[in-house]
């Protein structure tokens, strides 16, 4: 084999702490290496041209590029090899940037380590063989998980492009958090007026199948061909015949059920439609509060239902769907603010969350848009807003900024003045973060036109005094402690990953960060992709975002889906396992350890049991190769011999320069 | 007000505070929560969050000469509620140690009370409350301190008029002497058991 | 129940808070808890010691923890939160070898084993238990409206104290509820009373204790229950000073919680040292039919 080695400077990223020419010089002594050089930017056009030219001039069979992580540029160099007429798998990369130059400052040691990494790569390359991809069909249907505004946008864009969409929503209605909001910043337009039509579009679009009150149970398969099992949770109402007339709600005697849609500001009935604009507009029974399901007595709803759709015996059902791509748009939940004992930990009824306040201000909310104190129904005249409750707070393991609280707090303060003109509002903040279009102007307007008193400092404690709440905080600009008596305290509670997000990420085989937010493939350049092909992200599932950004991401994810579906066939990755039938004894241990069900048992011509890999299902994880007692299964491109060659290269006595 | 020259922080002071308190002042992002919860803020000359800021700027003399250090009662509100997990009360404790070492005592009576208290402990092994009052009056000349409380307490027998001396009193006294780095008096070294 | 536990009364227990010591011993005896005094105990150093030097403070405290351990007492209970804080923080800091060595150098002892410290409040809730307390009640405190005031350092800092909620502690509320009292939620449970500033800066104590008294009065309580000698002294003995400084006329009796528990368990006024209180507790106890 004739091997060429290219050592990249990456400007000064590598060259500052690695002697690249020395590494290239040393590489010339490695077995089969016939050409070695250093290059300023291997990935640049002249850099790639240099590789292609060298392949041709020196009749190279394979190349080692010592540069950055293969995550970054493996596809780039593979394409370069192909342009020079080599098989793309005749490339090996040595990561001398992330693994060497960025983590160590000692140039001598770094140069030695870089040389060893090049040697490892060259030794492996000597055993590489050309691999060829197979083609397979794409199922041009997409699964959208989550029916908030981000998921709705992704679903509508795909559906409008003619793609079949399966939308799965955990709650009984789509709409997500946006459906609960009163107005939206910075234009103060009505949230349900702009979201409502989109929700209706989802319901009426011929290309969208909506599973509400459902969750993703199981996902298998791979890009282009995912098999999804959806659990449709029992609602105890036959939705096929429910007309959403609401008669059951009027008659249900269990009127103290938790009202999740209204954030517990009011109570609802055990059988309910969460809000008038719900999509689908279907009733569901909350079994926790239903007397029939709890005690076997009642059944009033079944008696009054004109279409006889109540079914107390209903069970969860599982439906299977085949899709080619998945958009995860699972949104966010509020941080559990009751860990803040100093704000009453939930003891004081007139300390509410920002989302509860939205419901209190909303004309279709439980108070018909009249702001009232939960304790006594009185209209508050002094409202104190406390920002960063569960944000930018290391002591509760929420060091990140939730991003949009500054803006909605300003909006809520403005609306408070609209609702109650003789009221005073106070906002305790640490920094005003308002970088969006028209955002900072909005927060200024809150102060200048609406007279909202902004106080720069955190609040240390809230305590009741008679029928008011005393808020004791700091005004760091005035440089001292301040106290204000409030009729109502609104906590701008921070954002955290949706409950169960980490669990879903594991089903989707995508990464998530320490807080449960899904990891994008690249923080700048691949914001809606994940590291699992065919799975895309939108909205707050990836991190806190406001509505415009969530909508933008929904459309971006849809664009990625449509790009994927623009091809009729996809290429499979040949880096998968394959069974040497001669060595396989048919013990089938591999079928038991394979996490993807990618190995099946077959009979050879003599009727002996043998293992066989389903190429399109295999993810190339390699578990089977270490399970097989006879070394009969080998992972292509990472065979035992290739890995041993790498180990042997590393364990050689130190090189002499 | 004085212009602070940012290029000249007392970095040795900052290092000392960091080392002696085990706390990292740069973790403070000036939210003001410590000041917000401080019960003593009304009596302070510099609020605690500003002490933290001056500390970040390395302003040794301003900090060590402030009265607030002496008025803090270590109630731990600041430490308990700091969003960045800084043990603020501990930093203030350390600053107070440094102020003492530097010979500052901007609330002289507070220092006098503490000194009288510890003198009593050193002498008897336990605190003798009447002795503390006497020591405090001696140091400050404030004879009328709490004089009106005497008639309330004396008839109730709440004030022991005689110190409780304990067997280990000499052990306690030695702890203090060693703390101050004083040589042991010849008469008491050796022989005695603890 | 039978429980034997080390006991550290603290210096004020022999002086200004003699009734706390007396009532604690009496109530523990009723509950079957045997208190064994730490032999030849000395002062923990209190606030003045830690404001001077942390090693000195820890040495003064650790002497007691070592004496207790040598006497076979694994756990020592103290009614005083200031002693509790010093003893526990000393034990906590001495887990660091370097600090422990510094303390050893001052103490001239090895400090190999140190007793653990718990507040008497914690022992009553966790070791004795509310059910046991309730079972011993013979004269329920029915009709007595009480605000429970814990003071600032009974539960702080939480990682050292490891007991109850640092913002809304409930141990004393639950104990007195078990004794039949009507306990009102007191929002300033953990706000500082002014602590040891009484002598050098009584204006500070008047202000801070005055706020506590105002808040308690606003809740219409008959009495305040405390668990700290310094809090009790500031609120009771210095109540007159607070009234004078702030133009108020409070006359709220300030008990130690052990005194109220004792009364509920049928101990006499003398046995719990009621006569030591400055603000006369008689009217409120008579109103509630407890005397």
Image (spheres, coloured by chain):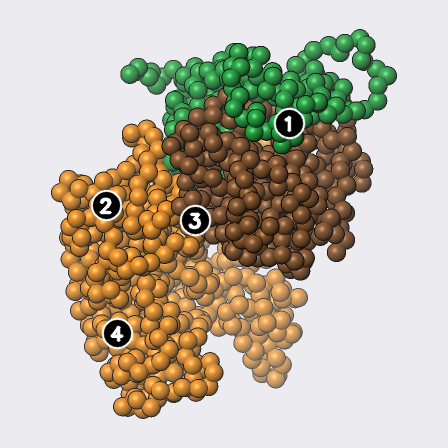
Chain colours: A orange, B green, C brown
The residue labelled by disc 2 is A425
Please name which of the two marks, 2 or 1, marks the residue nearer to the observer: 1
User: Seen in the image, is C72 located left or right of residue A410?
Assistant: right
Decide: marks 3, 1 in contact (CB < 8 A)? no
- Residue furthest toward the right? B191
- Residue A131 location, quadrant: bottom left
Can marks 3 and 1 be said to lie on one chain? Answer: no
Alpha-carbon distance for marks 3 and 4?
Answer: 52 Å
**Residue drawn at 51 percent across, 72 percent down:** A597
Alpha-carbon distance for marks 4 and 1?
Answer: 76 Å
User: Seen in the image, is A42 located left or right of residue A640?
Assistant: left
- Residue A472 location, quadrant: top left
User: Seen in the image, is A150 located left or right of residue C8?
Assistant: left
**Residue drawn at 68 percent across, 19 percent down:** B122
Q: Chain of mark 2?
A: A
**Residue drawn at 37 percent across, 72 percent down:** A256
Percent from the top left, x then y, of residue B149? 54, 26
Judged from the image, the secondary structure of the residue bearing numbered disc 4 is loop
Please name which of the two marks, 4 or 2, marks the residue nearer to the observer: 2
Percent from the top left, x then y, of residue B49? 39, 30
The residue labelled by disc 3 is C220
Numbered tag placed on residue A279 in the rendering: 4
Judged from the image, the secondary structure of the residue bearing numbered disc 1 is loop
Please name which of the two marks, 3 or 4, marks the residue nearer to the observer: 3
Numbered tag placed on residue B159 in the rendering: 1
Judged from the image, the secondary structure of the residue bearing numbered disc 3 is loop
């Amino acid at each position: 084999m004739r091997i060429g080695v290219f050592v990249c400077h990456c400007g000064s990223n590598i060259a500052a702490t690695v002697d690249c020419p020395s590494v290239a010089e040393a590489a010339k002594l490695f077995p089969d290496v016939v050409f070695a050089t250093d290059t300023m930017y291997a990935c640049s056009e002249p850099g790639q041209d240099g590789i292609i030219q060298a392949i041709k001039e020196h009749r190279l069979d394979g190349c080692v590029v010592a540069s950055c992580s293969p995550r970054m540029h493996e596809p780039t160099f593979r394409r370069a090899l192909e342009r020079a007429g080599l098989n793309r798998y005749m490339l090996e990369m040595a990561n001398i940037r992330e693994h060497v130059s960025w983590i160590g400052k000692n140039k001598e040691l770094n140069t030695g380590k870089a040389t060893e990494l090049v040697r490892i790569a060259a030794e492996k390359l000597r055993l590489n063989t050309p691999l060829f991809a197979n083609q397979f069909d794409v199922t041009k249907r997409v699964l959208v998980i989550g029916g908030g505004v981000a998921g709705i946008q992704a679903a509508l864009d795909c559906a409008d492009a003619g793609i079949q969409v399966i939308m799965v929503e955990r709650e009984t209605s789509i709409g997500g958090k946006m459906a609960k909001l009163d107005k939206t910043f910075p234009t103060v337009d009505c949230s349900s007026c702009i979201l409502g039509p989109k929700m209706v579009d989802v319901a009426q679009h011929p290309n969208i199948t909506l599973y509400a009150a459902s969750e993703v149970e199981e996902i298998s398969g791979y890009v282009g061909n995912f098999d999804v099992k959806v659990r449709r949770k029992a609602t105890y109402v036959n939705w096929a015949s429910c007309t959403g007339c609401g008669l059951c709600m009027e008659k249900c005697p269990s009127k103290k059920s938790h009202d999740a849609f209204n954030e517990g500001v009011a109570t609802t009935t055990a059988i309910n439609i969460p809000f008038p604009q719900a999509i689908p507009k279907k009733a569901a029974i909350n079994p926790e509060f239903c007397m029939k399901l709890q005690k076997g007595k009642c059944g009033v709803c079944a008696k009054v239902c004109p279409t006889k759709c109540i079914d107390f015996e209903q069970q969860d059902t599982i439906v299977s769907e085949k899709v080619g791509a998945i958009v995860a748009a699972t949104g966010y939940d509020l941080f559990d603010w009751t860990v803040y004992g100093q704000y009453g930990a939930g003891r004081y009824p007139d300390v509410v969350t920002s989302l509860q306040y939205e419901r209190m201000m909303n004309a279709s909310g439980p108070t018909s848009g009249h702001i009232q104190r939960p304790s006594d129904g009185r209209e508050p005249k002094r409202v104190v807003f406390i920002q960063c409750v569960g944000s930018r707070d290391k002591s509760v393991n929420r060091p990140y900024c939730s991003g949009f609280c500054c803006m909605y707090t300003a909006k809520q303060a403005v609306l408070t003045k609209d609702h109650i003109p003789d009221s005073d509002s106070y906002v305790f903040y640490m920094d005003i973060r308002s970088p969006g279009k028209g955002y900072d102007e909005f927060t200024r307007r809150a102060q200048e036109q609406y007279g909202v008193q902004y106080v720069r400092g955190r609040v240390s404690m809230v305590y009741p005094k008679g029928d008011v709440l005393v808020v004791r905080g700091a005004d760091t600009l005035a440089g001292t402690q301040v106290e204000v008596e409030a009729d109502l305290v609104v906590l701008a509670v921070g954002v955290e990953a949706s409950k169960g997000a980490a669990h879903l990420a594991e089903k989707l085989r995508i990464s998530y960060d320490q807080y449960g937010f899904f990891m994008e493939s690249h923080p700048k350049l691949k914001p809606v992709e994940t590291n699992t092909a065919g799975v895309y992200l939108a909205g707050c599932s990836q991190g806190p975002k406001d509505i415009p950004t969530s909508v933008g991401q929904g459309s971006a994810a849809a664009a990625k889906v449509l790009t994927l579906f623009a091809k009729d066939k996809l290429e499979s990755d040949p880096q998968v396992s394959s069974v040497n039938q001669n060595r396989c004894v048919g013990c089938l241990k591999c079928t038991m350890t394979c996490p993807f069900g990618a190995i099946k048992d077959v009979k050879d011509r003599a009727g002996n049991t043998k293992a066989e890999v389903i190429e399109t299902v295999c993810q190339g994880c390699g578990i089977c190769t270490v399970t097989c007692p006879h070394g009969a299964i080998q992972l292509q491109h990472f065979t035992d011999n290739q890995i041993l060659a790498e180990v042997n290269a590393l364990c050689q006595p130190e090189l002499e320069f | 007000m004085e212009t602070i020259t940012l290029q000249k922080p007392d970095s040795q002071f900052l290092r000392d505070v960091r080392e002696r308190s085990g706390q990292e002042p740069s973790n403070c992002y000036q939210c003001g929560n410590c000041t917000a919860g401080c019960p003593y803020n009304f009596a302070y000359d510099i609020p605690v969050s500003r002490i933290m800021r001056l500390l970040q700027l390395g302003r040794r003399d301003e900090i060590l000469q402030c009265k607030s250090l002496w008025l803090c009662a270590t109630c731990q509100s600041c430490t308990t509620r700091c969003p960045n997990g800084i043990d603020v009360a501990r930093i203030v404790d350390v600053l107070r140690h440094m102020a003492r070492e530097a010979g500052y005592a901007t609330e002289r009576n507070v220092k006098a009370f503490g000194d009288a208290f510890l003198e009593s402990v050193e002498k008897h092994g336990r605190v003798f409350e009447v002795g503390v009052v006497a020591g405090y009056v001696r140091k400050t000349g404030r004879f009328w301190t709490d004089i009106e409380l005497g008639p309330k307490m004396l008839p109730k027998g709440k004030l022991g008029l005689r110190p409780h001396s304990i067997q280990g009193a000499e052990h306690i006294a030695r702890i203090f002497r060693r703390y101050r780095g004083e040589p042991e008096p010849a008469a008491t070294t050796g022989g005695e058991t603890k | 129940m039978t429980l034997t536990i080390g006991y550290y009364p603290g210096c004020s227990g022999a002086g200004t808070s003699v009734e706390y010591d007396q009532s604690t011993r009496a109530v523990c005896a009723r509950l079957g808890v045997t208190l064994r005094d730490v032999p030849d105990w000395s002062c923990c150093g209190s606030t003045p010691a830690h404001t001077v030097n942390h090693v000195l403070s820890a040495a003064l405290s650790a002497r007691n923890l070592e004496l207790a351990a040598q006497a076979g007492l694994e756990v020592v209970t103290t009614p005083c939160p200031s002693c509790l804080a010093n003893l526990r923080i000393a034990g906590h800091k001495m887990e660091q070898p370097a600090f422990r060595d510094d303390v050893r150098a001052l103490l001239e002892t090895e400090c190999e084993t140190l007793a653990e410290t718990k507040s008497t409040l914690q022992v009553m809730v966790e070791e004795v238990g509310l059910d046991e307390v309730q079972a011993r009640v013979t004269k329920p405190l029915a009709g007595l409206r009480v605000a429970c005031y814990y003071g600032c350092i009974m539960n702080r800092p939480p990682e050292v104290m490891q007991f109850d909620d640092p913002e809304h502690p409930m141990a004393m509320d639950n104990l007195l509820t078990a004794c039949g009292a009507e306990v009102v939620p007191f929002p300033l449970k953990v706000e500082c009373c002014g602590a040891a500033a009484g002598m050098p800066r009584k204006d500070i104590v008047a202000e801070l204790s005055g706020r506590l008294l105002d808040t308690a009065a606003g809740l219409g309580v008959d009495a305040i229950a405390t668990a700290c000698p310094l809090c009790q002294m500031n609120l009771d003995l210095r109540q007159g000073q607070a009234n004078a400084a702030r133009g108020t006329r409070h006359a709220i009796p300030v008990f130690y919680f052990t005194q109220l528990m004792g009364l509920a368990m049928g101990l006499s006024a003398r046995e719990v040292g009621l006569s030591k209180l400055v603000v006369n507790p008689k009217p409120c106890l008579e109103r509630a039919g407890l005397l």
